[in-house]
Amino acid sequence: MTQITLHNTRTRRKEPLEPIDPNNVRMYVCGPTVYDRAHLGNARPAVVFDVLYRLLAHVYGAGHVTYVRNITDVEDKIIDRAAERGIGIDDLTRTTTDWYHQDMAALGIDYAGDPQFHEPHATDYIPQMVEMIATLVDRGHAYAAEGHVLFSVESYDKYGALSGRSVEDMIAGARVEVAPYKRNPMDFVLWKPSSEDEPGWDSPWGRGRPGWHIECSAMSHALLGDSFDIHGGGIDLQFPHHENEIAQSCCAHPEGGFANIWLHNEMLQVEGKKMSKSLGNFFTVRDLLDQGVPGEVIRFVFLQTHYRKPMDWTEEKAKAAEATLRKWRGMVDGVEPGAVPEAVVAVLADDLNTAGAIAELHRLASNGEAPALKAGARLLGLLGDAIGDWARVGADLSGWAERLASVRAAAMETKDFTEVDRLKAALIDAGVEVRMSKAGVELVPGPGFDPAKLEGVE
């Protein structure tokens, strides 16, 4: 069996994955807070951990891996957005969760019908959260104050181990919510009171709702137990979210070890800069899809960078990825995939080195090893049938190329290029790159290719 090694954020070194139960390798990944469309940064962990899930299933067997990725459907951002729109949070989160599923499916992440994948919604686990909070209070790790329940950071002497910072450093570097009822500025909310116009549930501390951190601790325990193998998410969640999860879970269930290996993917940039609305470089996944960038291209660009390195999204990378995928799809069209190449598995098993795996796919393509290329790519979630529709439309351009070549040949005789210019303009407007030379006419669909624009062109 292939040995998988992963960089453990907690120990700051690469370690062999040694499952607690090889017949049930368990992974929890923090999912989206569904108040709006998923932006490009939200998509990176979804792709990263989808590849890890595929690798685990390949190595241990599809029926021997349990993957849990939650949906946060009660949180202050959700409450605020629902109030802005004048709708209930249930109406908002149903819509935004559907959006998330659609956008992720476009990237090749679709777990519909997969019995090994679980997607708990926070609002379905309120009783488990209340029970865990009560346990923490009973054990002296939490206290009630003015309708709130707060975790006492001082009660857990390992607090800060994941992020490698002392409590004093964290106070200095964090935007800590100042509240008179806190015993320590770093104490964080487990339960908060809800007003009449806010969603709330009954509890021993009055009507209220859970804090964000307790949600993941309760859901992971309910579905994976007090010890499991891998916990993942973006590096932005390392502190305070994951640090707080560890404190809550280890204090509520000291008999367990919570997560053995912690994986964090780095952040995403756009054209070398941090993605932000103020810079005008903020994109949702849907923005790119609507601009004609195929989901498979987005996925490919993500996988070209190791998950532990910052990833820079550029238009140039997207164009190059599309060209590569079109070439590879042409090579493997009609070819039955072979066995997944051991070289691809070995590179991926070394701390999920997707960039190295892409390099190996390039080598297979150069050698003309189509069956191996197809199998290796599919382990990465590429060259699958479900996300390949975008590439098939390119074949429709062959007739246009012949037509333009014919019109161009006639124009060379008459010196009247009016019709050539008209057809060329229509093709360019539809997102087609037109290349004309002595060798002939070549039409290349670009990232924004829209075949519908050519339907009415005579």
Image (cartoon, rainbow, N blue to C red):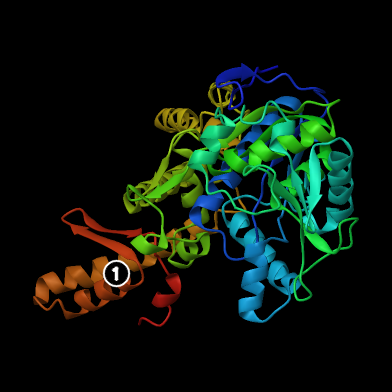
Residue 358, percent from left and from top = 46, 33
Front residue of 212 and 133: 133
Answer above or below: position of 129 versus 377.
Answer: below
Is residue 375 visible from the viewing direction of this image? no
Front residue of 79 and 225: 79
State the residue at coordinates (20%, 75%): 421
Q: Secondary structure at mark 1?
A: helix
Question: Within the image, what quadrant is residue 216 found in?
Answer: top right
Tell me if 149 is positioned left or right of 237 in this view: right
Question: Within the image, what quadrant is residue 422 found in?
Answer: bottom left
State the residue at coordinates (17%, 56%): 437
Which residue is outermost to the left? Answer: 415
Answer above or below: position of 193 versus 425.
Answer: above
Residue 207, percent from left and from top = 85, 64
Residue 320, percent from left and from top = 35, 47
Tell me if 122 is positioned left or right of 375 in this view: right
Front residue of 443 and 289: 289
Q: Which residue is mark 1?
A: 428
